Amino acid sequence: MKTTQIKKMALASLLAAVAVVLSPLSIPVGASKCFPIQHLVNVIAGVFLGPWYAMGSAFITSLIRNIMGTGSLLAFPGSMCGAFLCGLLFSKTKNLIAGCLGEVIGTGIIGGLLAYPVATMIMGKEAALFAYVMPFLTATMVGSFMALLLIGILDKSGAFRMLQKMVN
């Protein structure tokens, strides 16, 4: 295994751990728990690790939160789509705003729509097709904005480039 892969796996695991530890900071919105810290972590993972490691980190976070009883099955489609699309758009454009938009679209719209079959078929809940879009959009916009601020501060201080070099 290459050193770069080990570094990326270690950072993905660390980010998943941060997201799990901060999972009590959820906000109930409508039919779901909104978790802006997950979206903050997704953007950080997408920017520093790329789409696949970011999606893996989101999956591990969702899995652990479900095992611990602090999350729901709805976390899987939202967080994984958002993290992947964020990482994909950032890797293609090197633009932080594009990465944040990827998180918002991936989680808020795509993940919100994918939550419908999870809720109705797996969880046995009655829900409208767009029932999860607004709550997911709310959480992801807050978390993505927090990530935009944090990474912006890191960029101005020079720490952003240093961290990118360490991971890659």
Image: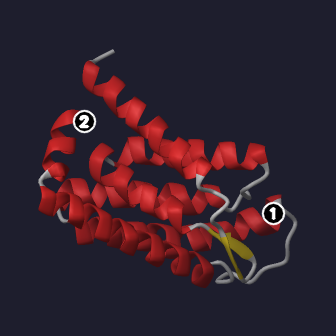
Residue at 61% from the left image edge and 67% from the top image edge: 114
Q: Is residue 18 above or below residue 89?
A: above
Amino acid type for the residue under numbered disc 2: Val
Q: Quadrant of residue 118?
A: bottom right
**Would residue 6 appear left or right of 56 to someone viewing this image?**
left
Image coordinates for residue 100, horizontal then vertical, percent: 33, 69
The local secondary structure at tag 1 comes to helix
Residue 168 shows in this picture? no
The local secondary structure at tag 2 comes to helix
Residue at 53% from the left image edge and 68% from the top image edge: 36
The residue under label 2 is 167
Residue at 46% from the left image edge and 76% from the top image edge: 142
The quarter of the picture where the C terminus appears is top left
Image coordinates for residue 57, horizontal then vertical, percent: 49, 43
**Would residue 138 appear left or right of 27 to someone viewing this image?**
left
In the image, farthest residue toward the front:
157
Q: Which label's residue is closer to the chain start, 1 or 2?
A: 1
Q: Is residue 165 above or below residue 24?
A: above
**Would residue 62 appear left or right of 127 to someone viewing this image?**
left
The quarter of the picture where the N terminus appears is top left
Residue at 81% from the left image edge and 63% from the top image edge: 121
Of the pair 135 and 158, the residue shown nearer to us: 158
Image coordinates for residue 103, horizontal then vertical, percent: 41, 66
In space, the residues marked 1 and 2 are separated at their CA atoms by 40 Å
In the image, farthest residue toward the right:
124
Amino acid type for the residue under numbered disc 1: Met
For label 1, the crowd category at 10 Å Cα-Cα, with few meaning under 14, some 14 to 19 and many 20 or more, is: few
The residue under label 1 is 121
